[in-house]
Amino acid sequence: MCGIIGYIGTNENTEEIIINNLKKLEYRGYDSSGICLFDNDKFYVHKSLGEIKNLNKNLNYEIKSHCGIAHTRWATHGKVSINNTHPHLSFDKEWCIVHNGIIENHLDLKNELLEKNIKLYGDTDTEVVPNILSIQKGTILQAITKTIKKLDGSFAFCILNKKSKDTLFLARKNSPLYVAKNKDEVLASSDPVCFGEKFEYYYSMPEKTICVAKKDELTFYDFELNIIKVKKTKVSVFEKSATKGNYNYFAEKEIDEIPYVINNIIKSYSATNYFKKIDCNFLQSVNNIKLIGCGTAYHACLMGAKYIQEKTNIECSAYIASEFRYSNPHIDKNTICIFCSQSGETADTLLCLQLAKQKKAKIISLVNVPYSSIAKQSNILLPLCAGMEIAVISTKAYNAMLFVFYMLSLHMQSVLKQKKIKVTKKLKRLSKANFFFNANYIDDISNIILKSEKVFFIGKGEDYISALEAGLKLKEITYINCVSLPSGELKHGTLSLVDNKSIVFVIATKKELLSKNLASASEIKSRGGNIILVTNLSIDETSLKDIDFVYYFDKTVEECSSMLCIVPFQLLAVKTCLKLGYSPDKPRNLAKSVTVE
């Protein structure tokens, strides 16, 4: 949700350094972008709509600045326009800022500024901030603290002030911000992925912190301007892996990495016992388990809840994070809350975690980013070990979530029943599976979709969850309106939409449910719908009379079929997206890391 960069250095190609790092954050938003360079007591601001490559075309690289800030936007307040594009200057041109987050009381602050005859040019919430800074009295730091105390919501700021050359002022609350320093450079970013090339260590700014960054020192303060110490973190391989390699798109690369991810999880969890703290004492008084996530992570939670309840017989439920806090959930010390997020910064999920902590629940998190806010605030971290996922659609991280949830369910079963389960043997069988079995048929299926007006995904049990995720993947990057529902619900309303211009994917991976799914297929066929069955079961030809096309994926441990059957749908979404001329990495209106509620 928006990417921000701040830089100070001795190099005269500051502009190029900032733009190159900003490109690494484009997964966070690509509605517009902008840069401000600070040179000779003047702010040089350039802005452009669309992707960062459009901004790059307008830059002449002739300004010999050593300091600057930049931003790539995912619009929340105000349309996509130059006036709403960051950076934003104050009315007196003394302050310039970029911002990630949302200022919830910006309308009240706008009225305060209008009463002082200060004109605002855009609709964004951020524009109020530099102007509020300019009407504060006192030192630069005092102006910053007075301003941020007036702000409700979330923010990560990079701030420049004309009276303080070659200095970056950073501030954060409820939105991540990181800063790194070497001998002659300082780089601030909303994601440590920018530090992989030049820096050995970085600092993760704690909640409600200000940093004054100069080339030769970093000083951290709390919001009362007390100096505080912040521990540095070593830049890991995780921050160095954000490259496409020989692929045209990250989405293609990340799907191809799924077998590697499964093997990496097995290797990492074999080397480090991440489940160690989930022992008899931890599970002793637990009477319910709640799994919370958003979007793809929520679908993983649905699957995880099925895995865990089946193995442990403890009541498990999955919840959409944005609804959970408002449902008056029953949580106490006998509750385990498991939070699932690729980025570990998902605002809705993080707020739910904080609520669960207040109610003394036991907190487990499944995240892909080990330095993230959710990871840091959990009692137990179960890393996804998927490596950087840059494409906005989540693919390999979803498979990793399912895999870790499955391992967790087996571990809990082992602890509660006090018997050793040969987890590794089952998992190694899955790691040898062919995730791309029959992938050559995806192109044909994609052509069928492009000729259809309506697309449906149905299944029962775990297959319904796969239907939800398959539909989400397709709609995210092709903008095709899809409907996902349990097969038994088809006749309770949605069947009225089915006609000869409809394509219906029937997902069937459980023998005991096959007849039910085939019965739903017959209902569809009698209404003229075209049916594609996705299965790993052996089915006799007479049972397939109503099926137009069967896609078989690789057979493996039946319990793990959901981890395999989703891959063809991920490939299908990307293939269809490319045929429509869209980018699978940057779908419209979406961003990778949703750090606002």
Image (cartoon, rainbow, N blue to C red):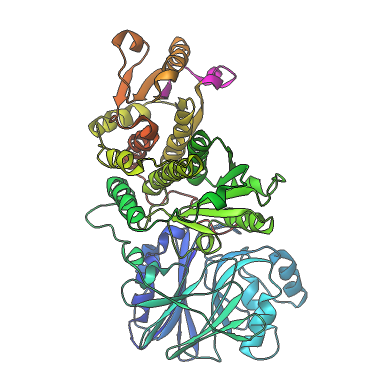
Above or below, comparing residue 70 to residue 578 in the picture: below
Above or below, comparing residue 337 to residue 551 in the picture: below
Q: How many marks?
A: 0
- Nearer to the camera, 246 or 485: 485
Residue 528 visible in image = no
- Residue at horizontal 55 percent and vertical 73 percent from the top: 206
- Tell whether 427 sits left or right of 191: left
- Tell whether 441 sits left or right of 82: left
x, y percent for residue 492: 59, 18
x, y percent for residue 393: 42, 47
- Residue at horizontal 52 percent and vertical 37 percent from the top: 312
- Tell whether 395 sits left or right of 223: left
- Residue at horizontal 34 percent and vertical 56 percent from the top: 268
- Nearer to the camera, 303 or 175: 303
Specify start and end residues of the magenta stretch as a single range: 488-507
x, y percent for residue 68: 45, 80
- Nearer to the camera, 529 or 207: 207
